[in-house]
Image: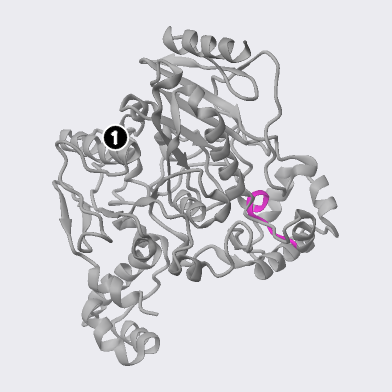
Amino acid sequence: MKKLMFFFLLTASLGHGQTIVETHNGKVEGYTEGGIQIFKGIPFAQPPVGELRWKAPQPVTDWNGVKACKTFGPSPIQNTPEPFLCWTEEFIAKPEPLSEDCLYLNVWTPAQKKNEKLPVFVWIYGGGLSSGSANCDIYDGLQMAEQGVVFVSLNYRVGVLGFMAHPELSEESGHNASGNYGFMDQLQGLKWVKENIAAFGGDPNNVTIAGQSAGSFSVNAQIASPLASGYFDKAICQSGGILGGRLMQDLDAAEQQGIKFMKSANASSIDELRKMTAVKLQELSNNQEVGRFGVVLDDYFLPKDLFGHFKAGDHNQVKVMTGWVTGDSNLLPTGKVTAESFKSMAKERFGAEADEFLKMFPAKTDEEALESQQKMNLLSFAGLPSYLLAKYTDKPVWLYEFTHVPTDKPGFPNYGAFHTSEVPFALHTLDQWKRPWKSQERVLEDQMSAYWVNFAKTGNPNGKGLPIWDSYNNEGGRLLTFETDAIEMNSEYSQEFQFLSQD
């Protein structure tokens, strides 16, 4: 009888434009916009506060009645979000509310009934694992839902509250590991999707996870983690990956960082740290001597020998789309580069193969050396991790490079094809980004988001009316370039990748 009433509720609500859905933990009420049903601020785990601070997320507790889910839940504790450089307010988390109680997700669904089994697209935000939120304007899921996917975005803990390791935490964990709580939050969100998304018209067996920058690192982490097996079957990694080795420590080093942080807080135990306010801990984490918190190779969520894990093909073998933006090169420090200094670096790093390296990264003049250094930065941060993911994955992997320079914003500097600038094109959210867009950019938005949606639907980005996109690892080592005026395949970087990836 209960199941019959549950089906009746779903049929009545989704079928007649109402917005009450019964999840496994209780009923939620959202709202409609343009035929899309929207639910914001659905809890997917218990608040990670008090004794649950620095612990794996716990399943959300049931509630009675109908929970209003019409506004975003709080963003995770971080420094006050504010625009900087090229990242205007559309790319930044709302300045408030910020809270340690932040584990909420959002759903946009076009489904009119429970049994539609629509593909599910789960978005994981960037922010260097130290900031970010699902409430950023450019992550709005309306347009993607209008193309036939159930769009989900979720919050996760960041910074000291999301990634600090410590020997006491490892001891109490039950698996001799600590850190990576933000990644565990993401996985808890995926578990919620597995259990509940059918109630929103989604198919729990057709789930794509996607993210950009630290979100891409996160997707890579889920691909790597044995704990995430079976919770997704496709992945999109935009601008960055853990195979680049950045923001990463083994457990011993991460625990030492935690010890250092505890001393800087004048605390003698985790219990004392748990009694401090989250805001105070965030302030203390800005101590540059402590360093940034990030990926922990804990031999629990992530294998200790990460590269060996991928080389052996022991990661979650799923279809992947991955790539980068040319402006990613600006994320790594360049410093003063001269022809002499660049050639010296080449000889020191590559020895007898330095001449071969300099053919691909020439340095005949200071200007040429700087260009080669920027190219190295690009491939190091984003290109090589994408290539290695394709190299070690048995299923098809599609690579891309985004080179389009967004149209100028009046009175604002031109930052070129900057880091994150591809996201509104991929998620079809140019309307959320306040610029005087040209008609050809609208076409690019339609095409790029169509690739993303096609991939979520079928596991292949190709579709009617789109330039052919060949997989990189199975069809000749070519990538797709999103140029200013064209989308086309090319073999750029193939020699560089093979050279730089040599053991």
Question: What amino acid type should be assigned to the residue bearing mark 1?
Answer: Arg
Q: Say above or below: 307 vs 185.
A: below
Picture coordinates of residue 148 (x, y %)?
A: 33, 27
Q: Which residue is mark 1?
A: 435
Q: Say above or below: 345 vs 47.
A: below
Q: Say if the magenta span includes residue 401.
A: no
Picture coordinates of residue 47 (x, y %)?
A: 70, 35
- Name which quarter of the figure residue 80 lies in: top right
- Identify which residue, 69 or 362, lies in the foreground: 69
- Name which quarter of the figure residue 335 lies in: bottom left
Q: Say if the magenta span includes residue 162.
A: yes
Picture coordinates of residue 108 (x, y %)?
A: 44, 25
Picture coordinates of residue 129 (x, y %)?
A: 55, 52
Q: Secondary structure at mark 1?
A: loop
At a point 59% along the width and 15% down the height, the residue shown is 3
At a point 45% along the width and 47% down the height, the residue shown is 84
Q: Which residues are magenta?
A: 160-166
At a point 56% along the width and 55% down the height, the residue shown is 226
Q: Can residue 411 be seen in this snapshot?
A: no
- Identify which residue, 157 or 26, lies in the foreground: 26
Q: Quadrant of the N terminus?
A: top right
